[in-house]
Image (tube, rainbow, N blue to C red):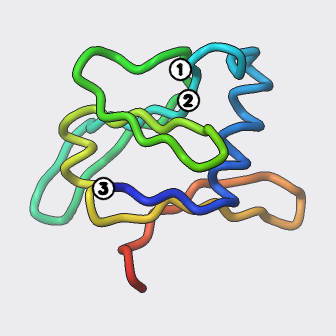
């Protein structure tokens, strides 16, 4: 199952509160756009709730990540983290678990 770092959970909470969704079931949703032998192309969006069939990953802090079925298969052994550049902008990053 996808693991989520504390930093990524905090970023998700910040994004959902900016969108006015924190009081609802808002979260970050991954969906599979395409895949081939080289990997997968994923779409990422802040959404108010999971779609039917989504796998829901909830962190200890209550942040939610929604995974469309195809995305869940690709992300099963990954860790979601976040990085911040010098301007303060954040970017989500995926890495293999255990690295």
Mark 1 or 2, nearer chain start = 2
Q: What residue sits 47% from the left and 38% below the top?
A: 65
Residue annotated with mark 2: 27
Instruction: Examine the image and state in which quarter residue 82 appears.
Output: bottom right
List x then y, in percent, for residue 88: 87, 56
Q: Which quadrant, please, contains the C terminus?
A: bottom left
Mark 2 or 3, nearer chain start = 3
List x then y, in percent, for residue 6: 66, 60
Asked if disc 1 and disc 2 are in contact, CB closer than 8 Å, the reply is: yes
List x then y, in percent, for residue 10: 72, 49
**Depth check: 15 or 84 in front?**
15
Q: Secondary structure at mark 1?
A: strand
Q: What residue sits 80% from the left and 52% below the top?
A: 89
Instruction: Examine the image and state in which quarter residue 30 appears.
Output: top left
Label 2 or label 3, whichever lies nearer to me, is 3
* On screen, residue 73 above or below 86: above
Mark 3 or 1, nearer chain start = 3
- Horizontally, residue 82 falls left or right of residue 44, namely right
Q: Secondary structure at mark 2?
A: strand
Instruction: Examine the image and state in which quarter residue 87 appears.
Output: bottom right
- As measured in the structure, the alpha-carbon distance from the residue carrying label 2 to the one carrying label 3 is 17 Å
How dense is the environment of label 2, judged by Cα within 10 Å: few (below 14), some, or many (20 and up)? many
* On screen, residue 55 above or below 7: above
- Horizontally, residue 29 falls left or right of residue 26, namely left
- As measured in the structure, the alpha-carbon distance from the residue carrying label 3 to the one carrying label 1 is 20 Å
Residue annotated with mark 1: 47
Q: Secondary structure at mark 3?
A: loop
As drawn, the residue found furthest toward the front would be: 60
Residue annotated with mark 3: 1
């Amino acid at each position: 199952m996808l693991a989520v770092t504390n930093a990524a959970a905090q970023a998700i909470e910040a994004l959902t509160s900016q969108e006015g969704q924190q009081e609802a079931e808002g979260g970050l949703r991954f969906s599979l756009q395409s895949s081939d032998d080289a990997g997968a192309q994923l779409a990422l969006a802040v959404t108010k709730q999971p779609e039917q069939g989504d796998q829901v990953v909830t962190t200890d802090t209550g942040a939610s990540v929604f995974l469309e079925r195809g995305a869940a298969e690709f992300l099963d052994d990954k860790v979601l983290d976040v990085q911040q550049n010098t301007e303060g902008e954040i970017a989500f990053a995926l890495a293999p678990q255990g690295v």
